[in-house]
Image (cartoon, rainbow, N blue to C red):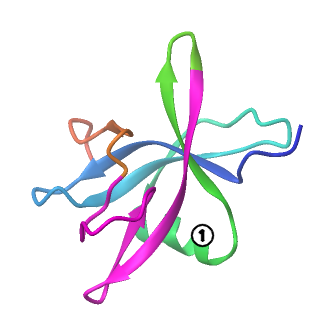
């Protein structure tokens, strides 16, 4: 089986304006298993995409993880945002990722 992506995103942290500040990023192994997530800034994830890495979302669908959409980014009003589906919203839209905001950002 071909490698599905270089990284998966399973969760997000958002600020008070509902913008993503950090993501829970998992490195994908050659056999499509993946490593523990690492809290990473949104800008690091965007830079990984710019370096031609592929990122997909994953969601927990008991008893297994479900592979979601491909993640990309857009530049709007001099700010870059992570995206899964292009639309007119000028904000991040990884809405199906687990909201990790109750977990400390430190």
**Residue 34 shown left or right of residue 95 in the figure:** right
The answer to whether residue 106 is visible is: no
Residue 47, how many percent across, how many down? 55, 74
**Residue in view at x 23 percent, y 61 percent:** 19
Location of the N terminus by quadrant is top right
Q: Is residue 48 visible?
A: yes
Boundaries of the magenta span: 65-93
**In the shown orientation, is residue 32 left or right of residue 80?**
right
Give the quadrant of residue 31: top right
User: For the point 25% across and 66% down, which residue is it?
Assistant: 91
Q: Position of residue 7 (x, y in %)?
A: 64, 51
Give the vertical position of 105 relative to 83 (above or below): above
Q: Is residue 76 in the magenta section?
A: yes
Asked which quadrant contains residue 41, the reply is bottom left
Residue 78 x/y as whole percent: 29, 89
**Callout 1: helix, strand or loop?**
helix
- Taking the view exactly as shown, the residue that stands out farthest to the left is 16
Give whichever of 38, 62 is nearer the camera: 62
Report which residue position mark 1 lands on: 49
Closer to the camera in the image, 87 or 32: 87
Most distant residue in the bottom direction: 78
Position in image of residue 96 (x %, y %): 37, 39
Work out which residue is located at the far front of the displayed protein and give it: 87
Residue at 48% across, 23% down: 60
């Amino acid at each position: 089986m071909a490698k599905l992506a270089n990284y998966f995103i399973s969760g997000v942290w958002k600020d008070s304006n509902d913008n993503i500040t950090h993501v829970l990023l998992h490195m994908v192994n050659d056999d499509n298993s993946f490593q523990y997530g690492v809290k990473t800034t949104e800008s690091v994830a965007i830079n990984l995409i710019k370096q031609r890495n592929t990122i997909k979302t994953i969601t927990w669908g008991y008893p297994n993880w479900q592979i979601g959409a491909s993640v990309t980014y857009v530049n709007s009003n001099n700010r870059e945002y992570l995206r899964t589906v292009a639309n007119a919203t000028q904000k991040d839209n990884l809405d199906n990722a687990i909201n990790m905001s109750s977990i400390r950002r430190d």
